[in-house]
Amino acid sequence: MLKINEVFFGDHGITSTSANHLANLAKELIRSAEAKLNNLSFVTTRIDIIGSQNQEGKIIQKGIDETFLSEIKPLIEKIAEFNRFCSWIREAIKAKESELLKIDYKNFSEWLEENKIKLEMPELKTEVKIEDIVEGFNIKERNELYSLEAVASTIGKLIHKKGNISLARAELQQCLIKPYSATGEGQNTLIFAHNPSVDEKKVDDVFVDLQKWHRSVEQRLNKLKYSIRRKVTDEKIRLGNEKRLEREKFENKKKDLMFRFNEWKIRENERISNLKIVIPEDLQKTYDYLTSLEK
């Protein structure tokens, strides 16, 4: 409750219904007192018609006498006193309505903040990359991966269709088919003899051996990469389950807090509604007088 509104309420006092009823009664008394002061005049006016035998004339406006004159101040004091009472009651009821509206308009987020309650869905990692798995490798595992990649790449470049060894082997096969070649014409003709420097079978054996080596390294590399991909999948599943569990915990906590929030609104609404309006000591006589009229 706002500090400015606390002054109106206490353990001892009257209900809003009773206060409103007494304020309405005070207003009726105010209207009654004000009616006596309306059209107030201190002059008595008579009208005389020429030739009339009534020398005093006819009274058309009667001014107040000294008896009523002495009642003016008490009437004003009475009006002022009742107005003071109504003003206090009006402000008290307005304060209570304001506090009730605050409860009605208060949202869940505001309530959490006021009670220093944190309700946040934790930011959980769900995206997993190959690099994340490799990052967790020890020195031996990391070296094996890089070594296999390096060896596979080195061999692959050489035995590839356009690799140096493949091209040299193709050149050897070509020279066996065409051991001689020529350029130029007539006397300027140059004849080239192409002779194998090594046995073709030995070259083929080396090439086949390189292919086997490459396949072996590729198999080991693919097996390792498959293992990494499996770990990526397993980690995604693990993180997905973790996020699901965290989401369930979050929703359950939110549901519980929402229940507490609604419960608080009901209790607080009831508490404010039941607050008693305190009658200041200065207005106690007025209150007692108005109450006595009800008996």
Image (cartoon, rainbow, N blue to C red):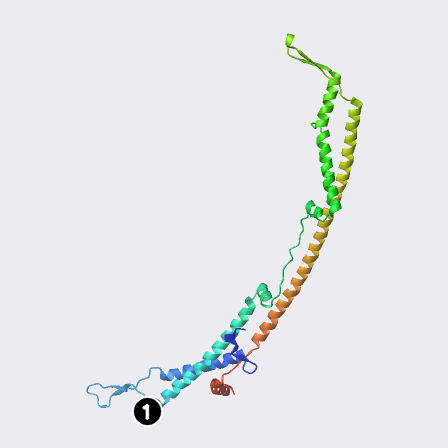
Secondary structure under tag 1 reads: helix
Image check: 147 left or right of 54? right
Between 163 and 96, the residue placed more toward the observer is 163
Q: Quadrant of residue 275?
A: bottom right
Instruction: Please identify the residue farthest to the top as the structure is shown.
Output: 186
Q: Quadrant of residue 230?
A: top right
Between 195 and 48, the residue placed more toward the observer is 195
Q: Is residue 45 above or below residue 184?
A: below
Please identify the quadrant where the N terminus is shown: bottom right
User: How many labels were placed on the picture?
Assistant: 1
Q: Residue at x 71, y 25 (%)?
A: 167
Q: Residue at x 77, y 41 (%)?
A: 223
Residue 212 at x, y percent in the picture:
79, 32
Image check: 100 left or right of 190? left
Q: Quadrant of residue 196?
A: top right
Between 93 and 177, the residue placed more toward the observer is 177
Can the viewer see residue 230 in this picture?
no
Query: Callout 1, which amino acid?
Result: Glu
Q: Is residue 24 above or below residue 56?
A: above
Q: Is residue 259 above or below residue 226?
A: below
Residue assigned mark 1: 66
Residue 236 at x, y percent in the picture:
71, 49
Residue 157 at x, y percent in the picture:
70, 31
Mark 1 Cα within 10 Å, few/some/many (few <14, many 20+)? few
Q: Residue at x 73, y 42 (%)?
A: 145
